[in-house]
Image (cartoon, grey):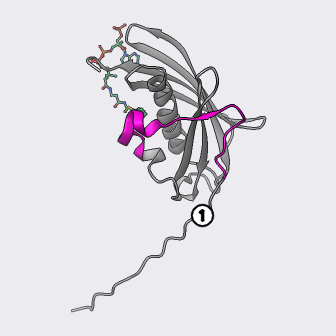
């Protein structure tokens, strides 16, 4: 019988990143609003996948600083499209929750405008565009400086009874 070998896998964490907001942004306590729903993107704040921090501005619009770590890689050195979509799903869904609508995402339309380099802190901005009946439309984009990496339209549907 072959001997079993115990292998120790060492995962080295990337160094801390600055997820600080703009002047006038107030940190937004997303977990206290939606808890575990944020695990996929925001669940490992010191890990190598995503690092995220949420804020609201004076007009109550939700913003996020997001770092795409090496575990989000798709094309070499750049974020996977699904990783970008996951951030849009969480951030725009959360924007609806933060505006007072208990929702799930029914439809998410993402346009990938530029390849997003790994280990870069980018900003997500969001706007609740409309709310009619159970349908809440949220728009958002991921950008850094003048470069827009992705834009999204997110149709959120309120959950009856919430
Ligand atoms: C938690 C906050 C931070 C994290 C956010 C994370 C967000 C998520 O990822 S949620 C997970 C991903 N989303 C899901 O799993 C949702 C799965 N889908 C569902 O549960 C259901 O289809 C649901 C709830 C959206 C709608 O079902 P149901 O409650 O039966 O409503 P239904 O009658 O079909 O639709 C209500 C209205 O919305 C419209 N609608 C529903 N889905 C869509 C869609 N995909 N596209 C367009 N319109 C839609 C319907 O046409 C209907 O319109 P109208 O009232 O004018 O007839």
Q: Which residue lies most toward the left here?
A: 1
Q: Quadrant of the N terminus?
A: bottom left
Q: What residue is drawn where x is 44% and y is 25%?
A: 97
**Can the viewer see residue 23 in this picture?**
yes
Q: Position of residue 74 (x, y in %)?
A: 56, 51
Residue 105 lies, with reference to residue 11, above or below; the image says: above
Magenta residues span 18-39
Q: What residue is drawn where x is 41% and y is 46%?
A: 39
Residue 126 lies, with reference to residue 122, above or below; the image says: above
Query: In the shown orientation, is residue 122 left or right of residue 109?
Result: right
Query: In the shown orientation, is residue 20 left or right of residue 30?
Result: right
Residue 5 lies, with reference to residue 64, above or below; the image says: below
Quarter location, residue 9? bottom left
Q: What residue is drawn where x is 31% and y is 20%?
A: 159
User: Who is closer to the viewer here, 121 or 108?
Assistant: 121
Secondary structure of the residue carrying tag 1 is loop
Image quarter for ligand 1 equals top left
Q: Position of residue 16 (x, y in %)?
A: 62, 59
Residue 34 is a magenta residue: yes
Q: Position of residue 90 (x, y in %)?
A: 47, 35
Residue 107 is a magenta residue: no
User: Who is closer to the viewer here, 57 or 82?
Assistant: 57
Number of numbered tags placed on the structure image = 1
User: Who is closer to the viewer here, 67 or 25?
Assistant: 25
Q: How many residues crowd mark 1 within 10 Å: few (<14), some (14–19), many (20+)?
A: few
Q: Quadrant of the C terminus?
A: top left
Q: Which residue lies most toward the top here?
A: 132
Query: In the shown orientation, is residue 44 left or right of residue 75?
Result: left
**Can the viewer see residue 116 in this picture?**
no
Q: Which residue lies most toward the right here?
A: 146
Tell me the residue that label 1 is attached to: 14
């Amino acid at each position: 019988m072959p001997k079993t070998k115990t292998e120790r896998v060492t995962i080295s964490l990337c160094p801390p990143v600055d997820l600080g907001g703009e002047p006038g942004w107030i940190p937004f306590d997303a977990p206290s609003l939606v808890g575990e729903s944020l695990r996929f993107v925001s669940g490992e704040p010191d890990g190598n996948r995503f690092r995220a921090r949420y804020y609201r501005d004076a007009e109550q619009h939700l913003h996020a600083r997001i770092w795409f770590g090496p575990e989000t890689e798709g094309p070499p050195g750049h974020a996977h499209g699904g990783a970008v979509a996951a951030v849009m799903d969480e951030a725009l869904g959360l924007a609806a929750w933060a505006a007072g609508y208990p929702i799930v995402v029914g439809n998410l339309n993402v346009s990938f405008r530029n390849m997003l380099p790994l280990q870069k802190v980018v900003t997500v901005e969001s706007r609740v565009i409309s709310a009619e009946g159970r349908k809440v439309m949220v728009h958002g984009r991921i950008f850094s400086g003048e470069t827009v990496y992705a834009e999204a339209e997110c149709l959120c549907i309120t959950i009856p009874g919430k």
